[in-house]
Image (cartoon, grey):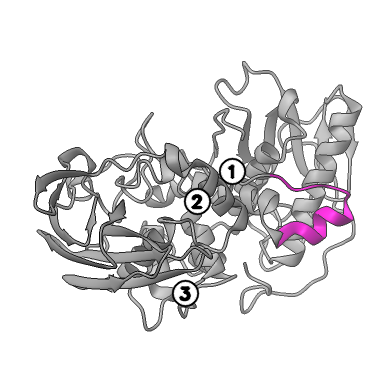
Amino acid sequence: MFTFPTVVTLTLAYYANHASARPAGVATAVAPAEYTANPSVGGGSGSYKDSAHFRLYNVADASAAAQSIKVLEAAHQCFVEEQGWRTPGLAQETTGNNGPWYKTNIYKVAESDIPGAAGVQTADPDAGLAYLKVLEEYIAMPDVVVHEYGHAMHYSEKNWIDQTRTGAWWETIANFIADSYIATPLCEKAKTAAGLAGGDSLIELDKVIGDSHQVIVDATADTGNNYQAWPFLSYITNNPDSYTGLGKSALLDMIRKYDLNSNETPLHSLERLLSGVTIQKVIGRYWARMAYVDIGHEKAQALFNTQRETLTYANLDSNGNGKYTAKTARQPRYMGANIIPLTTTASTVSVTVTATGNYTATLAVKAASGAIRYVDVDGSASATLATGEEASLVVVNTPALVQYDAFSLSAEVSKGLDYSIQLTGATA
């Protein structure tokens, strides 16, 4: 798994800005088979390698350059041509899809140019076009170049630019795009056509589950989770609970139906997509499914099955007689969760939850076959376990939505949910 930090830099703002069809009202001009080179974007000079949609500058290793182009072209085919993202080849000022279309420039740079990063997406504000800077040793690595290309697509979508409260989600989205490309069936057709293989999921379980109590997307320096929080986007895209408003187009809908220039959070945009279910229910069920990484992502779940014994679940203090309270430091914060594996002592497990704020709690019950069922805990609930079944309790802090900046968390979103539980038939 790639762990070297990657960052995004947008010159238009400090933080910045799967549908199968274009947004309503967008012109349907046909893009050319090959875009036009635009070396002025990023100050292109020196040797280069061209492809239909990219120009790669100054890579000495011809094999690495060829591989990088193959990876990027497959990403373009998958996300732009097949999934409907707006191509980074269209300038910000371009209306609809009427062109002109320009190749995306990628520059091999020295570490001194992008200190602490493997790759950076930046932009030319006059041209309204994104370009990438990548260290040569990472130029052919999809977890770097597809991550940065994901930023470029997001930039091209425009709606989140200059919106501080969307800022932290840029990294969440870029890693979701990279993982979707590498480890899910989404881009299999494009990769196979290019002779490219897949790989393991980028999921970082020690952070996503081990620190599940954190704010759902938190960009606090050194301790945040915004690079790791992308499984939530996998959940709303795969939509294993078949909630109306979620599914293949959910992320693009969140971006395209954002209340323009409102500086709202992405969760507010997501809430408007839903019908017949609350955002609190959606987030509660996402975390319940993360008890066993049951989010429709086979490779992520496979990693969980091999790593689960190493993960941190120290969320509760025992008060005896089946009573527990959440550790103060581990109380779930805004839309965060405590995942609590249970050791069963009887065939029926019962739980009562008492909390000082709004919460969503669920018993996740996993059969030996791998099938998982979910029991809502509305104050209290019971589940009868068959032979070989195991259970986890998941408690999520689900208040009304808050307008918050993930780079500067307020006291309101940082406050943990103070709760206690009473268990019978199991221990925590």
Q: Is residue 336 visible?
A: no
Q: Which residue is mark 1?
A: 202
Work out whether residue 161 or residue 287 is closer to the camera in this orientation and state it.
287
User: Nearer the N terminus, badge 3 or badge 2?
Assistant: 2
Tag shown at residue 241: 3
Query: x and y percent of residue 198 in the render?
Result: 75, 48
**Label 3 residue SS:** loop
Dots 3, 1 in contact, CB < 8 A: no
Residue 133: quadrant of the picture: top right
* Relative side of 358 to 147, left or right: left
Query: x and y percent of residue 115 in the render?
Result: 57, 20
**Label 2 residue SS:** loop
**Residue drawn at x 46%, y 57% as measured from the top left:** 232
**Label 1 residue SS:** loop
Q: Badge 3 local density, few (<14 within 10 Å), some, or many (20+)?
A: some
Dots 2, 1 in contact, CB < 8 A: yes
Work out whether residue 331 or residue 265 is closer to the camera in this orientation and state it.
331
Image quadrant in which the N terminus is located: top right
Query: x and y percent of residue 386 in the render?
Result: 39, 70
- Distance from disc 3 to disc 1, alpha carbons, whole Å, reads 23 Å
Q: Is residue 149 positioned above or below 33 on the image?
A: above
User: Nearer the N terminus, badge 3 or badge 1?
Assistant: 1
Mark 1 is on which residue type? Leu
**Residue drawn at x 90%, y 59% as measured from the top left:** 33
Q: Which residue is mark 2?
A: 230
